[in-house]
Each structure stands twice: as structure tokens, then as C-alpha cells.
Amino acid sequence: MSVRVFALLLFCLLALMPSSMAFGQVRTDGDSRRPGSGQEELPANIKETLAKQRIEREKKEYDELLKRTEEAVKLSDELEKAFNDSNKLSGEDRKKLDKLEKLVKKIRSDLGGSDDENDEVEKGNEEDKPNSLIGAFKSLQSNASKLFDEIKRSTRYSVSAVAIQSSNVLLKVLKFIRFGN
């Protein structure tokens, strides 16, 4: 019987030995990081490379924002000219109107704006609301130019409340043109 107990104890000891070795791998110098946990300090050259990549990505995003804004100004000019020529919008012009709306929404989201419509903002911008379609197209073109100028003045590090407000005004004008209210 004692041989069986001895064999059982030896088996349990051998079974628990790998787990005690695993606990021996944990650092006891106050640093709770484990090897392979992803929390290890990166070498300086890798940190520099990551910083350069982040800067290049931010520059690219800012350049894309500028291109979108330039395209919005171009589309608003084309829409104003088309409406002045015929006093109505063709199917192609409606597609341009849709494209312009998508661009302005993308610009606004890139700037950090959202779809939130505050009553105070609505009341404060009643003078921005056009009275006619002719006025709406002139307002569309001038507000698109204002948005472009504001984005050119800003940097990729800044958030321009004026640019967000201009994009919101542009969207209201687009809504007026589309629905006539």
C-alpha cells in the first residue's frame, strides 16, 4: 500500500512541476510585463519610423481634405452656372448636387463635425437661409469658397469651428435646393 501512495505522490509532484516552473518565469522586480505580452519597450528607431508614418498619414489626410474642398467649390460653381443658364437642374446636375452633398458631409466628418442639429444654431443662422433658388445657388458658391479658404488657413493639427459651421450652412443650402424649403 505504501508503494501505491508513494507512486501517487510522485505522479502528483511530476504533474505540478511544470506549473511551478511557469510561475518562475514571472518577473518579481516590480515590472508586471510578461515576455511576449506586447507591452515591451520599442527601440528608438522603430518609434521614429512609426512617428514618421503617422506624420505622413496626417499630411495625406489633410491633402485629401483640401482636394475634396476644391472639388466642392468646383461643383458649386458648375451648379450655379448651370442653373443661371437654364433656371432649372438637369438629371446630371442633380447627380452633381448629390455628389456635392456627399463631399460636404465627408468634409464635415473629417473636421470633427456631426449631424447634430441644435435649435440654437438653427435660430442663429436664419439669415443664412436663402429666399429663392437663385439666392441659394449664390449662397452655395460663396459658402463653398468660404469653406475652402477656411480649410486652407487651418493646419492639419487644428480643428476649425468656422469650417464646420460653413459645412453645416452648405448642407442647409443643399437641402433648400433639393427640397425647396
Image: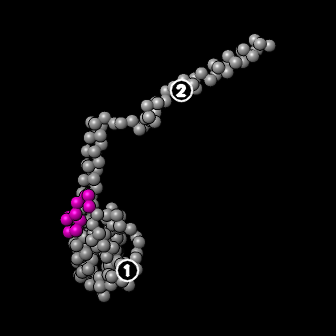
x, y percent for residue 99: 33, 68
Distance of label 1 from label 2 (alpha carbons): 63 Å
Which amino acid is tagged 2?
Ala
x, y percent for residue 87: 28, 84
Q: Residues within 10 Å of mark 1 (few under 14, many from 20)?
A: few
Front residue (pair 171, 97): 171
Q: Residue furthest bottom?
A: 131
Please say if 150 is above or below 87. above
Earlier along the polypeptide chain: callout 1 or callout 2? 2
As for residue 156 lying within the magenta part, the answer is yes
> From which residue to which does the magenta span run?
148-158
Q: Residue furthest front?
A: 29
Please say if 180 is above or below 171. below
x, y percent for residue 36: 44, 33
Determine which quarter of the picture holds residue 140: bottom left
- The answer to whether one can see residue 56 in this image is yes
User: Which residue is label 2 attached to?
Assistant: 22
Secondary structure under tag 1 reads: helix
As for residue 1 lying within the magenta part, the answer is no
User: Which residue is label 1 attached to?
Assistant: 120
Which amino acid is tagged 1?
Glu
